[in-house]
Image (cartoon, coloured by chain):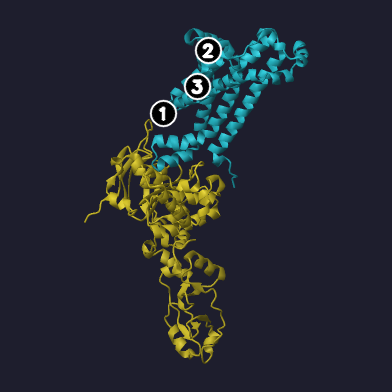
């Protein structure tokens, strides 16, 4: 399915660019943004946007699952935590284009490579936030839970994890916004996305400012939309945070 | 038929708790945190562990539900050693209250209260009904059950902490400075409420505090501990106050221990003296005769209902009959239900030697004096005359 999306990316189509007479001037003079032209050609942004959504959604979701796994492991065995923090931290410092290129010989050109790289980038932020969230659980609540006869597992899933939810969601928000931005470089791994609009269309065949601006605008809008969803999820998942304390 | 500990536990019946040379030594420590502690706590009693900070009292308490593992020795609840139990299972049968309360911020009050019922598999309806029942028991509106802990005041949260510990009707409760984090006025209110609850519930309670006054107020028995987790004295509050085992205990209970002793009792708890009674209109000759060799050298005029009217002066006694209005007012008139310490204070403030004591209907019951109180304090009676914590006057 991912492959199918990639194959339908409408690339710059030579003369086809300049069909519309009124808008042609704007495009010809390469103004900052040719809004009318962009609106008339809106359908050409649909696939890159969907690809981008998919890249962000899948990599953040995979990052969350892996980070949760790591945090369960390091919760039981505290000595693993510095190792996990260091490893995810080091990965985060690898320049993204370099990582895409490094992965090409291993996972080949395409969405898989992009998803691997993007997922790796989310780990640092999500894992660190889960760790912080778990560390911030009040000792008294843990002591009371244990003292009432909760097993370690019950305490973890019924008390510690739910109380870490706000921090975890805060981590997901940062990870998602940064992934929306980094995913525009997935085009170098051959995974399409909004990078296709910004780079392939806006830069590669000579600078076309409208494509750069529109591609970026969609990315920004996407980041804001994700944030709104997270704020909603936050309210839904941590109702105790919404109450007014006495 | 012999009823086993498990069955009695099931019914929420209080169980005895016995520390048998229970010892805790942390790895790498050069001395024991708790050293060969032996205590017997009868079922239904409140045992207060008290001592300076670092004396091991909290550690000792936490050994009972294996929040701290015993290094040597044993603790037996009912007739089962805690060492034979799985820690989680054991803890579900023991109420647990801590100073920081430790309510779960993400769970409603009702959900917090229903924690242990949930762990032991009660169905939701039963757990919810129990939560509402407990909210009523601790004097909170059932509607508060839907709120989150952050929406409750400190005092309310502390009550919920107690309710949560009571949820599965444990026979034994551990309470670590449960009222330590609230202001003095609320603390006293919470202590009194808890003692009233305990009068009905009759749980076996291990109660930890560093405050000797709280220990005296809450304890049926008090274990005074010294640094190193060693037991300095294990006694009833009266024994502790009247006969401290050594200098450490004496210092710890404080120089005002005699007054503390008086705070634990009511006027009716000691043998009052009797003054010669004179009915209004009675011939003064008869009264004067009664004054010879009387315990109290003054005669008290009473009305037909035996209510004190006043002390008869020499001038009064020179009259033919006992006057309806004696020269000296009977004040202060004490009630036999008064706390002894307050009665003493009244006596001292009024600068009188003797004060009439009346019963609930205002009828004369006897006479109290500073002398009687001081004689009581130096007698053996002061050691033995004792109420359980729940029956004591609430100061």
Q: How far from the left and from the top, in percent, is residue B230?
A: 37, 44
Q: Which mark is residue A110?
A: 2
Q: Spot the residue most to the bottom.
A: B320
In the picture, one chain is cyan; tell me its letter.
Answer: A
Say which quadrant the N terminus of chain B sits in. Answer: bottom left
Question: Chain B hue?
Answer: yellow
Estimate how packed mark 2 is, as few (under 14), some (14 to 19) or many (20 or more) residues with alpha carbons within 10 Å.
many
**Image quadrant assignment for residue A171:** top right
Residue depth check, mark 3 versus mark 2: number of the one nearer the observer: 2
**CA gap, disc 3 and disc 2:** 29 Å
Q: Which residue is mark 3?
A: A85
State whether discs 1 and 3 lie on one chain.
yes
Name the residue rendered at 43%, 62% in the picture. B392
Estimate how packed mark 3 is, as few (under 14), some (14 to 19) or many (20 or more) residues with alpha carbons within 10 Å.
some
**CA gap, disc 2 and disc 1:** 37 Å
Q: Nearer the viewer, residue A66 or B93?
A: A66
Q: Chain of mark 1?
A: A
User: In the figure, B68 relative to B309: above or below?
Assistant: above
Name the residue rendered at 53%, 84% in the picture. B314
User: In the figure, A160 relative to B339: above or below?
Assistant: above
Q: Nearer the viewer, residue B198 or B59?
A: B198
Q: Which mark is residue A64?
A: none
User: In the figure, B296 relative to A123: above or below?
Assistant: below
Residue A178 at least partly seen: yes
Name the residue rendered at 54%, 88% in the picture. B323
- Horizontal side, residue B227 vs residue A114: left or right: left
């Amino acid at each position: 399915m991912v492959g199918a999306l990639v194959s339908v990316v409408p690339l710059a189509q030579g003369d086809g660019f300049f069909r519309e007479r009124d808008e042609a001037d704007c495009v010809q003079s390469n103004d900052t943004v040719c809004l009318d032209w962009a609106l008339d050609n809106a359908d050409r942004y649909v696939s890159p946007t969907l690809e981008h959504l998919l890249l962000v959604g899948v990599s953040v979701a995979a990052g969350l699952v892996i980070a949760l796994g790591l945090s369960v492991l390091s919760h039981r065995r505290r000595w693993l935590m510095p190792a996990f923090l260091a490893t995810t931290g080091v990965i985060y410092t690898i320049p993204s284009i370099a990582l895409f290129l490094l992965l090409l010989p291993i996972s080949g050109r395409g969405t898989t490579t992009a998803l691997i790289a993007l997922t790796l980038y989310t780990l640092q932020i999500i894992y660190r936030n889960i760790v912080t969230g778990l560390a911030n659980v009040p000792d008294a609540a843990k002591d009371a839970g244990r003292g009432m006869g909760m097993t370690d597992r019950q305490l973890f899933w019924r008390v510690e994890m739910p109380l870490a939810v706000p921090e975890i969601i805060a981590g997901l928000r940062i990870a998602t916004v940064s992934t929306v931005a980094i995913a525009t470089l997935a085009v170098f791994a051959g995974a399409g996305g909004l990078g296709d609009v910004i780079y392939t269309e806006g830069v590669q065949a000579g600078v076309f400012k409208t494509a750069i601006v529109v591609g970026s605008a969609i990315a920004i809008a996407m980041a804001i939309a994700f944030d709104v969803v997270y704020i909603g999820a936050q309210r839904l998942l941590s109702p105790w945070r919404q109450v007014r304390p006495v | 038929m012999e009823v086993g500990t498990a069955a009695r536990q099931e019914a929420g019946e209080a169980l005895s708790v016995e520390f048998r040379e229970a010892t805790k030594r942390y790895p790498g420590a050069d001395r024991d945190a708790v050293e060969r502690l032996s205590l017997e706590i009868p079922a239904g009693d409140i045992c207060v562990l008290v001592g300076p900070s670092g004396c091991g009292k909290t550690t000792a308490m936490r050994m009972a539900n294996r929040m701290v593992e015993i290094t040597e020795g044993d603790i037996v609840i009912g007739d089962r050693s805690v060492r034979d139990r799985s820690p989680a299972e054991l803890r579900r049968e023991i109420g647990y209250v801590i100073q920081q309360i430790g309510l779960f911020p993400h769970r409603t009050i009702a959900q917090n209260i229903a924690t242990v019922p949930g762990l032991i598999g009660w169905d939701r309806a039963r757990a919810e009904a129990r939560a509402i029942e407990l909210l009523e028991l601790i004097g909170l509106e059932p509607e508060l059950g839907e709120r989150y802990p952050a929406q409750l005041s400190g005092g309310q949260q502390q009550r919920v902490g107690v309710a949560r510990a009571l949820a599965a009707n444990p026979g034994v409760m551990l309470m670590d400075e449960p009222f330590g984090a609230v202001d003095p006025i609320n603390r006293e209110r919470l202590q009194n409420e808890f003692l009233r609850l305990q009068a009905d519930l009759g749980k076996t309670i291990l109660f930890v505090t560093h405050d000797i006054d709280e220990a005296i107020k809450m304890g049926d028995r008090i274990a005074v501990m010294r640094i190193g987790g060693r037991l300095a004295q294990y006694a009833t509050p009266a024994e502790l106050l009247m006969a401290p085992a050594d200098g450490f205990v004496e210092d710890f209970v404080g120089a005002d221990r005699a007054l503390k002793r008086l705070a634990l009792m009511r006027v009716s708890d000691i043998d009052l003296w009797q003054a010669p009674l004179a009915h209004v209109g009675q011939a003064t000759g008869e009264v004067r005769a009664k004054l010879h060799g009387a315990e109290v050298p003054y005669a008290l005029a009473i009305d037909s209902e035996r209510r004190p009217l006043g002390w008869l002066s020499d001038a009064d006694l020179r009259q033919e009959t006992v006057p309806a209005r004696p020269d000296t007012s009977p004040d202060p008139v004490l009630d036999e239900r008064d706390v002894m310490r307050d009665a003493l204070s009244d006596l001292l403030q009024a600068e009188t030697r003797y004060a009439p004591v009346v019963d609930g209907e205002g009828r004369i019951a006897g006479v109290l004096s500073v002398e009687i109180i001081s004689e009581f304090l130096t007698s053996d009676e002061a050691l033995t005359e004792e109420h359980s914590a729940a029956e004591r006057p609430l100061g």
